[in-house]
Amino acid sequence: MIAVIQRVSNASVTIEGKIHGEIGTGFLVLLGITHLDNREDMEWLGKKIAGLRVFSDEEGKMNLDLKSVDGDILLISQFTLHASTKKGNRPSFIEAARHDVAIPLYENMITFLENELGKPIQCGKFGADMKVALLNDGPVTIVIDSRNRI
């Protein structure tokens, strides 16, 4: 499971011309799920996301997590994070999980993050054509892969 986490001043996702979710200060999280992922990967990654200390403290150091700044999460499913470009110029998405694996893990991640933060998070719609807008703060962009824990 891969997460691209962007610290944002604001972010939104639009589906079929209507805003489906939006946040102010917090994280835009692009989540890629592979066919090898399971609940353990989801929980490990969810804890990393919720505990990530990349917001400035009173001394200007990145030392605060989402809860400390009352931040929000906009979670977007993104199978293209598992693209392979080893052969040719057309990406292969063979590593991306099929819907029967990906949807339950995506929904579990939503619930897990809501429990970790103690409030609802905003989401895209799995499999939808989404338009994502963001104002990256910093910019701060961090990639975490559950396969690279060590």
Image: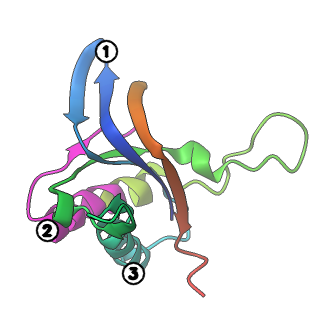
User: Circle 3: is it few (<14), some (14-19), or many (20+) Cα within 10 Å?
Assistant: few
Q: Which residue is mark 2?
A: 115
Question: Which label lies toward us, 1 or 2?
Answer: 2
Give above or below for 25 relative to 20: below
The region drawn magenta spans 105-128
User: Circle 1: is it few (<14), some (14-19), or many (20+) Cα within 10 Å?
Assistant: few
For mark 1, give the secondary structure. Answer: loop
Q: Earlier in the sequence, mark 1 or mark 2?
A: 1
* Residue furthest out toward the bottom: 150
- Amino acid type, mark 1: Glu
Q: Which residue is mark 1?
A: 16
Q: Position of residue 143 (x, y in %)?
A: 55, 60
- Amino acid type, mark 3: Glu
Give 10 or 98, whichever is nearer the viewer: 10
- Amino acid type, mark 2: Asn
For mark 2, give the secondary structure. Answer: helix
Distance between the alpha carbons at the discs numbered 2 and 3: 16 Å
For mark 3, give the secondary structure. Answer: helix
